[in-house]
Image (spheres, helix red, strand yellow):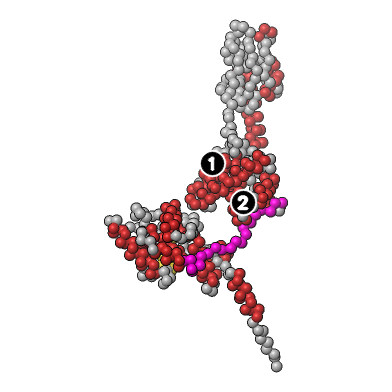
Amino acid sequence: MPQSPEFGTRREDALSRLAPSLLDGIPNDDEGEFEGNQDRNHNERHLERVGRYAKHKGDDHPKSTRGESQSDVCRKLQPTDSSHAETPIPWSAHIPSATEDGESSLARQTHETRQLPAHAGAETPVGKGATGKRRRGRRRKARSMGRYPFLSATDAYLRFVRPYIAESTFAVRRRGLRYLARTFEDLGARGSVRTTNPARFGEAEIGALVSWMRERRLGLDYQAKLTVHLRALLTFIGNPILDRVKASKIVRLPGRAEKPIHVKDDAWYEDAMRRLEGLSNWGGTAIRFALAFYYHTGLRVKELRLARLSDLDSIRWTLTIEHPKGEGVWASAGERIAIFPSLRPHVLDYLDARAQRLRDLGLDPEKLEPLIPSDRGMYYSEAGWRRRRLKTFGQAGIERTNFRVLRPTFAQRLKDRGAQIEAVSKALRHSSTATTERFYARIRTERAWDDLERLWEAPTVRVNSP
């Protein structure tokens, strides 16, 4: 996540919008000093109020009260008339905050009503007016977290991270955190957890979540993904429980398992291209070109969807990637990929069909920017491109297949033909070969055993020294 100048300020603002009950238990180092200052200020304000009351009663206050306790001062100023006697309010009954100047009543403090004798109109130390009823200060209401504290914390976290992540990433995190919110509500209803407030999560709550995921037989990858989402939320609100659990090894957190790489073979590709060739509409032409391009280059789906006509160089046979993954954050645009000779005829056929279609629509093919224009001559949106694929595949009788599967297909095809993993990783524009081997291409098990068998059975040559 980028550390922009307002990053810390935005996080503090987001945390301050959470209800105080969410952040209960988080220590405040300045709390003791703050209370001490309040007590000192309260004492000074109380002595000032006592002096004003004495002046109102006609007492010039000739005797100094320095060194006397506040309870003694109050006792000296108490009226002697038994018909107008009242019980003074001890100084310790006040809280360290005042209301208006000259008023002895304080905010957030309630007392029983002091009723004056009939026809008594003089003010008293405990109120104003003839009634003697104390004017009560308004109690400040704290915003409540309601019944769903996990959702409240989730909303604050999502508002904070929204400007820094892509739309697709934001949608994945939102779905995962809301799924976790429903899960913890269910666990709380069953009594499996002590609290559903993420700021108060401990080992018991994490252990209950891990047990619940295993009981539901969720996939290891999905368990690990939910744990990542939960860690992001807990880190945002300042709860390090996952780190403590991992360090203490009390609960074994789920990790990502090595899963098989799903790819398409050459037979599937040739059959799909033949079926798409039978469609005479623009959707069939655009999807056929995209299928061939993804299969031969391993591009990400959006990298071709947002490509411009000027990004394609039909002389050097390259395509410039202007919208890579992590655009504007950790990836830079402008990297070029090669277009293999087996793909070039498909590109030329598509460019001719594109020009003819745009001329029929009264548009200039050279001035229209998108390489694959929609029916309105604009870039396809993510949802629009997905609908176009599903509709065209359905018309051609092709099984529902995501274009994303063609990226590991490209990588695995190269690896099966003997390409080095470093070269495959470079073609996919990965920063590490570990990502390539884990998710896109690795030596197949049967291929590994064939190579090992050949080495095992090879005769050993011994050279006897003379």
Q: Secondary structure at mark 1?
A: helix
CA distance separating discs 1 and 2? 26 Å
Task: Report the residue marked by disc 2.
Answer: 227
Residue 98 drawn above or below residue 176: above
Whether residue 185 appears in this view of the structure is yes
Residue at image location 67% in from the left, 89% down from the top? 463
Q: Say whether residue 304 is left or right of residue 75.
A: left
The front one of 131 and 377 is 377
The quadrant in which residue 466 appears is: bottom right
Q: Hey, what amino acid is under mark 1?
A: Asp
Q: Secondary structure at mark 2?
A: helix
In percent of width and height, residue 307 lies at 40, 59
- For label 2, the crowd category at 10 Å Cα-Cα, with few meaning under 14, some 14 to 19 and many 20 or more, is many
In percent of width and height, residue 368 lies at 33, 57
Task: Report the residue marked by disc 1.
Answer: 13
The front one of 273 and 55 is 273
In percent of width and height, residue 15 lies at 57, 41
Range of magenta residues: 250-269
Residue 89 drawn above or below residue 166: above
Q: Say whether residue 269 is left or right of residue 347.
A: right
Q: Hey, what amino acid is under mark 2?
A: Thr
The earlier-in-sequence mark between 1 and 2 is 1
Residue at image location 67% in from the left, 13% down from the top? 86
